[in-house]
C-alpha cells in the first residue's frame, strides 16, 4: 500500500482504540525514507543523527536495513555512554562538551574497546579530553568541527558554532592536538546547516525560496573548496583521517558530491518531520506522528483537541508549531496556536471529514527527535497493524538535553 492510501481512515482503523495522546511510527514509511536517504547519498556512508531519532528500538531497526548506515552522531556524552551500553559502536559526539564526569564516563567505554569520538574546536576541549585520557589510560579519538557557514555582505549564512572557518585555524588546532599523548585526531566534521537545515520550498514564499536557492548554490561551491583545502592540509601533516563527515538530511545531494567527504549524516529524514516538507531537492514521507483527541466543538468549523502544544526548538516562528496532518483540511488557530492543554483546529474549505467528539486527529511534529521528548513510547505500525510499542529515550528515563 502506497503513501497516498495511508489516509485518515487507514490510521484511525489501526490506532483508533489506543488511549490518546500517543505517538506512532509507520515503519513502512520509515523504511521507504531510509531507502531514499541511501539513494540520495550515493556511494557515501550515512551516519545516523540520533538527536532526530531518540529511540533505541528505531535506531536498531534502521541499522538492520540493508543500506550503508554506519555509526551514530549523538548529541550528549551521557547519551554516548547509554548508546554504547546498549550495543552501539562508532559513536561520534557531534558537539563539544566540557563536563569532566561525562568525559570520564566516555573514557570508561573507550577503555573496554568502544569507539567514541569527541568533538573539538579549541585547545580547551583538547586539553580536557587528554586529561581524562591520562586518567583512564586511553587514547581519546577526536574530531575537529570545521565551520561551514558562508559570509555574504551583510549576511551570515549558516550557524554560529565552531570558530574554525579557515585552514590555518584548523591546522593550529591540529598542532595543539599533536602536543598531547592521550588524544588522537581521527575525524573532521563540517555541518553546512544553511544547506541542510534551511528549506527552500515553502508554500507562499516564492521570492524567499528563490533567494535561499541562490544563496545555497553559491555557498555549496564555496564550502566544498574550504573542506577540500582543510582535509588536504591535515593530510599534509601526515595524519590519515578515519572519516570526513558532512551534511544532514537537507543537503545529501550536494554533500555527496564532495570527493573528500567519506560519510554524510542524516536523522530527520527518517521520521520526516514537518520542517522537512519544505525542500525542493527531495520529498520524504511522514513516518512519525502523534494523535490527540477531539474533546470539544465550540463552533461548527472548530474542533478543540486535548493537548498538542509540542513546539519545536530553534528560532521562534509558525513553522515550529506541530502540523495538523489527518484528516486533511485542518489548521491551527493563529491566536491560540497549539496549546499546553487545548488545541483548537479550524477546518477549511477542503475539509470533508465527519470528525466527532472522541475521534483522533493526527499531527506531525515540526522537528523529528523532539517528538520523543513528549512521549514515553512509540506505537510501531506496519501493513495495517500495530506491531509493538517501544520506549523512547524519555520512556527509558533518559533526558539528555
Ligand atoms: C552537527 C550536525 N550534523 C548533522 C545534522 C543533521 O541532522 P538531521 O539530518 O537530523 O537534520 C545536524 C542537525 O542539526 C547537526 O547539528
Image (spheres, grey):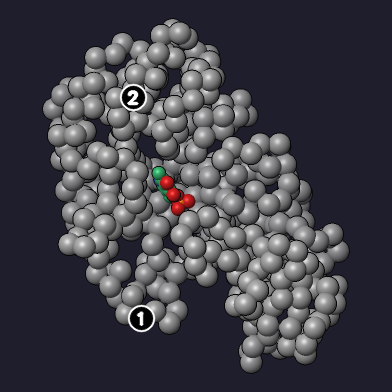
**Which residue is pictured at 60% across the width and 44% down the height?**
54
Label 1 packing within 10 angstroms: few (<14), some (14-19), many (20+): few
In the drawing, what numbered circle is on residue 86?
none
In the drawing, does residue 13 fall left or right of residue 397?
right
Say which of 101 and 47 sits in front. Answer: 101
Compared with residue 16, is residue 395 higher up or lower down, i.e. above or below? Answer: above
**Which residue is pictured at 44% across the width and 41% down the height?**
47
In the drawing, does residue 351 fall left or right of residue 114?
right
- Tell me residue 180's x, y (percent): 29, 13
**Which residue is pictured at 24% across the width and 38% down the height?**
164
How many discs mark residues in the rendered view? Answer: 2
Distance (Cα) linking label 1 and label 2: 45 Å
- Tell me residue 248's x, y (percent): 40, 51
> Which tag, 1 or 2, sits closer to the chain's start?
2
Quadrant housing the N terminus: bottom right
Say which of 165 and 203 sits in front. Answer: 165
Closer to viewer: mark 1 or mark 2: 2
Say which of 237 and 292 sits in front. Answer: 292
**Which residue is pictured at 37% across the width and 15% down the height?**
130
In the drawing, does residue 305 fall left or right of residue 253?
right
> Which residue is labeled 2 in the image?
124
Label 1 CB sits under 8 Å from any ligand 1 atom: no
- Tell me residue 231's x, y (percent): 20, 36
> Which residue is labeled 1 in the image?
206
Quadrant housing the C terminus: top right
Residue 14 shows in this picture:
no
Occupied quadrant, residue 362: bottom right
**Mark 1 in CB contact with mark 2 (< 8 angstroms):** no
Label 2 CB sits under 8 Å from any ligand 1 atom: no
Amino acid at each position: 500500500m502506497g503513501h497516498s492510501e495511508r489516509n485518515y481512515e487507514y490510521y484511525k482503523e489501526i490506532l483508533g482504540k489506543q488511549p490518546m495522546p500517543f505517538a506512532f511510527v509507520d515503519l513502512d514509511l520509515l523504511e521507504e525514507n531510509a531507502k531514499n536517504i541511501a539513494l540520495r547519498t550515493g556511494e557515501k556512508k550515512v551516519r545516523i543523527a540520533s538527536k532526530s531519532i531518540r529511540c533505541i528500538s528505531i535506531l536498531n531497526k534502521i541499522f538492520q536495513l540493508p543500506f550503508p548506515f554506519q555509526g551514530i552522531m549523538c548529541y550528549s556524552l551521557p547519551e554516548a555512554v547509554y548508546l554504547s551500553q546498549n550495543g552501539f559502536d562508532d559513536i561520534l559526539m557531534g558537539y563539544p562538551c566540557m563536563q569532566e564526569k561525562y568525559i570520564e564516563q566516555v573514557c570508561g567505554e573507550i577503555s573496554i574497546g568502544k569507539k567514541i569520538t569527541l568533538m573539538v574546536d579549541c585547545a580547551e576541549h583538547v586539553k580536557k579530553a587528554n586529561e581524562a585520557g591520562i586518567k583512564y589510560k586511553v587514547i581519546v579519538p577526536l574530531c575537529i568541527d570545521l565551520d561551514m557557514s558562508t559570509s555574504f555582505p551583510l549576511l551570515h549564512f549558516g550557524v554560529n558554532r565552531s570558530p574554525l572557518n579557515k585552514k590555518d585555524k584548523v591546522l593550529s588546532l591540529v598542532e595543539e592536538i599533536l602536543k598531547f599523548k592521550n588524544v588522537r585526531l581521527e575525524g573532521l566534521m563540517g555541518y553546512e546547516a544553511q544547506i541542510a537545515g534551511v528549506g527552500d520550498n515553502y508554500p507562499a514564499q516564492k521570492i524567499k525560496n528563490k533567494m535561499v536557492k541562490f544563496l545555497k548554490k553559491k555557498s555549496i561551491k564555496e564550502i566544498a573548496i574550504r573542506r577540500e583545502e582543510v582535509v588536504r592540509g591535515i593530510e599534509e601533516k601526515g595524519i590519515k583521517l578515519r572519516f570526513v563527515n558532512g551534511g544532514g538530511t537537507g543537503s545529501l545531494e550536494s554533500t555527496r558530491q564532495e570527493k573528500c567527504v567519506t560519510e554524510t549524516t542524516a536523522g530527520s529524514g527518517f521520521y520526516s518531520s514537518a520542517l522537512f516538507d519544505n525542500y525542493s531537492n527531495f520529498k520524504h514521507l511522514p513516518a512519525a506522528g502523534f494523535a490527540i483527541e477531539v474533546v470539544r466543538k465550540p463552533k461548527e468549523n472548530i474542533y478543540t483537541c486535548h493537548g498538542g502544544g509540542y513546539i519545536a526548538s530553534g528560532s521562534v516562528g509558525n513553522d515550529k508549531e506541530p502540523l495538523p496532518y489527518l484528516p486533511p483540511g485542518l489548521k491551527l488557530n493563529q491566536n491560540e496556536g497549539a496549546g499546553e492543554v487545548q488545541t483548537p483546529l479550524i477546518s477549511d474549505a477542503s475539509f470533508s471529514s465527519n470528525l466527532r467528539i472522541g475521534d483522533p486527529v493526527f499531527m506531525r511534529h515540526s522537528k523529528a527527535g523532539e517528538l520523543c521528548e513528549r512521549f514515553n513510547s512509540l506505537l510501531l505500525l506496519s501493513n495495517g497493524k500495530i506491531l509493538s510499542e517501544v520506549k523512547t529515550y524519555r520512556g527509558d528515563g533518559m533526558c539528555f538535553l
